[in-house]
């Protein structure tokens, strides 16, 4: 006579003692931790491995199909489980669950009795039956559920399955604290119950990752080869944004034969964002050797290479290959960082038109991402296409919820130079850019009241828009106000270029007005910012 709890405990303990053994036990861990699709993958992967009990594997596969609503498939697995080992109680519980779901309580109870006869002293069998009733209808079968729990307590008050079930019921009712207490009790009664640690950790991993980390660390102290425990601990560190420790734990996990291939991508991500670029590059290269069509591995190979100075000469070919494979297959999606790095590499190599195309695609694919517009603007600046830069940066501002003073000033600067760029060829277009510049100057002034720069920029625009004979006086009122604001600041040295520009302009204005004393005052202020300019000094000293 083989008992459910005894068989599960023996298999899980065996997995720990045998190092990295791949049996049904790993899939059972994932199922009992409510990770059903992961459980299914492992159960099917390990079905024919030495040490796997097919009765147990079929039982859990049947439960998974039942949860997915595939009743015929579930029955197939339960029947296969009975055929594999008629003395294993679990598959009779599974068949009973099917019959309860079909409204045939009498047949269900017959199967439950068979399960009980095979596990007379096993509290886990009673809890499995309680779960069957609970999942069928917790209200309708409330008495049966309570009866099975009571039987389980009489058989073994310390059986962790009791507290796992109670914890699950409390969690279903959003009593997180109560559920956590039950899961902790389950782990205390049996430290070889990985799902207890994981369920407890999952309650806290987003709100208090340290609680989760503590519990999962305990799990791995008891069962260091648990792929489930390794994976969950790595994810707990990830949720804490502790990428270094997350990568360290994932390194152990991806070395476990029971890891999932898709988690290799997460490990690649963690190596990159944890700053382990060489290791990230090496790992991604290893994955590509195993599967040259692994586009995610190719992405991380390129991303990491872009951060390694010694790989400078290899980055462009990697960028070209990545983008080529992306364009060749619509399933090969790029992330924002990919578009950014590829466009930067193309631009750095003088291929700005191609860089622009990459960013235009990025904007089309992810229109909400304002940074693409900003990057596009900077490429246009490098290519001396200021009007394009102004238009691109305007898109950045439109998508930015709370633009800063610097954002407004940058847009105003682009618009100002775009106005100059078009002044000789398209007066209307030039005026439109100047008008936009003034609009953003006003926004900048509102964001940073009393600062000199917005007023100075209005003076700059006034000079550009003035009639030829009025240029020498157009900025006077603006520069007068801007210099007053500038002189009231504690540290003006970092604004030396703006200061010299305005003092020189004002000095020349008063010189034109034959007001030499005032002109010299402005010229001498200029010299405070440029004291070694002997030619300028001699000019000022020579004024009469």
Image (tube, helix red, strand yellow):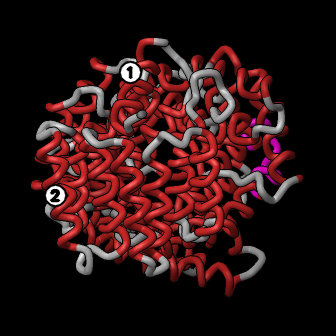
Sort mark 2 into few (<14), some (14-19) or many (20+) by Cα contacts within 10 Å: some
Sort mark 1 into few (<14), some (14-19) or many (20+) by Cα contacts within 10 Å: some
Please tell me whether mark 1 sits on a helix, a strand or a loop. Answer: helix
| Along the viewing direction, whichever of 209 and 398 lies nearer the viewer | 209
**Residue at left offset 56%, top offset 37%:** 263
Q: Against 241, is 151 above or below?
A: below
Q: Where is residue 234 in the image (x, y as percent from the top left)?
A: 39, 32
Please tell me whether mark 2 sits on a helix, a strand or a loop. Answer: helix
> Pointer 1: what residue?
13
Q: Distance between the residues labelled 2 and 1?
A: 29 Å
Q: Against 186, is 305 above or below?
A: above
Q: Where is residue 205 in the image (x, y as percent from the top left)?
A: 27, 45
| Along the viewing direction, whichever of 189 and 454 lies nearer the viewer | 189
Residue 311's label in the rendered image is none
* Relative side of 110 to 152, left or right: right
**Residue at left offset 38%, top offset 58%:** 112
* Relative side of 476 to 216, left or right: right
> Pointer 2: what residue?
176
Residue 353 part of the magenta-drawn span? yes
The span shown in magenta is 347-356
The quarter of the picture where residue 362 lies is bottom right
Q: Where is residue 50 in the image (x, y as percent from the top left)?
A: 63, 21
| Along the viewing direction, whichever of 237 and 465 lies nearer the viewer | 237
Magenta span: chief secondary structure: helix
């Amino acid at each position: 006579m083989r008992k459910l709890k005894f068989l599960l405990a023996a298999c899980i303990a065996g997995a720990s003692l045998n190092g990295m053994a791949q049996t049904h036990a790993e899939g059972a861990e994932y199922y009992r931790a409510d990770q059903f699709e992961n459980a299914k993958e492992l159960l099917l992967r390990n079905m024919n491995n030495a040490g796997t009990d097919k009765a147990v594997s079929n039982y859990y596969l049947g439960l998974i199909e039942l949860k997915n609503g595939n009743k015929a498939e579930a029955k197939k697995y339960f029947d296969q489980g009975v055929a594999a080992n008629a003395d294993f109680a679990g598959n009779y519980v599974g068949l009973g669950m099917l019959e309860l779901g079909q409204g045939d309580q009498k047949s269900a109870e017959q199967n439950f009795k068979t399960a009980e006869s095979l596990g007379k002293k096993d509290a886990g069998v009673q809890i499995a039956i309680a779960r069957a009733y609970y999942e069928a209808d917790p209200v309708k079968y409330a008495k049966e559920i309570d009866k099975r729990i009571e039987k389980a307590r009489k058989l073994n008050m310390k059986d962790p399955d009791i507290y796992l079930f109670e914890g699950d019921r409390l969690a279903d009712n959003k009593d997180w604290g109560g559920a956590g207490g039950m899961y902790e009790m389950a782990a205390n009664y049996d430290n070889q119950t990985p799902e207890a640690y994981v369920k407890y950790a999952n309650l806290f991993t987003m709100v208090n990752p340290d609680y989760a980390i503590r519990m999962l660390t305990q799990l791995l102290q008891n069962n260091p080869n648990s792929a489930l425990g390794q994976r969950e601990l790595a994810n707990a560190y990830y949720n804490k944004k502790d990428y270094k420790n997350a990568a360290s734990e994932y390194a152990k996990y991806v070395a476990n034969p029971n890891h999932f291939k898709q988690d290799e991508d997460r490990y690649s991500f963690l190596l990159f964002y944890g700053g382990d670029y060489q290791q990230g590059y090496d790992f991604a290269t290893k994955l590509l050797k195993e599967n040259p069509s692994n586009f995610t591995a190719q992405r991380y190979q390129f991303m990491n290479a872009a951060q390694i100075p010694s790989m400078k000469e290899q980055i462009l070919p990697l960028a070209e290959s990545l983008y080529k494979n992306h364009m060749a297959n619509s399933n090969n999606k790029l992330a924002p960082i990919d578009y950014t790095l590829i466009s930067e590499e193309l631009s750095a190599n003088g291929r700005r038109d191609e860089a622009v195309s990459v960013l235009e695609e990025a904007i089309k694919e992810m229109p909400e991402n304002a940074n693409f517009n900003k990057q596009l603007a900077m490429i246009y600046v490098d290519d001396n296409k200021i009007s394009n830069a102004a238009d691109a940066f305007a898109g950045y501002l439109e998508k930015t919820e709370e633009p800063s003073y610097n954002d407004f000033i940058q847009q105003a600067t682009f618009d100002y130079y775009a106005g100059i760029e078009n002044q000789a060829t398209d007066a209307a277009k030039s005026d439109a850019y100047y008008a936009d510049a003034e609009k953003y100057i006003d926004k900048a002034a509102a964001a940073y009241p009393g600062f000199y720069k917005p007023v100075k920029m209005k003076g700059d625009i006034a000079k550009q828009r003035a009639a030829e004979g009025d240029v020498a006086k157009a900025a006077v009122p603006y520069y007068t106000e801007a210099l007053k604001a500038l002189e009231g600041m504690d540290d003006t040295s970092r604004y030396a270029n703006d200061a010299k520009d305005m003092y020189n302009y004002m000095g020349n204005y008063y010189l034109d007005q034959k007001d030499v004393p005032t002109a010299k005052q402005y010229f001498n202020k200029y010299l405070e910012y440029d004291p070694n300019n002997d030619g300028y000094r001699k000019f000022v000293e020579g004024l009469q």
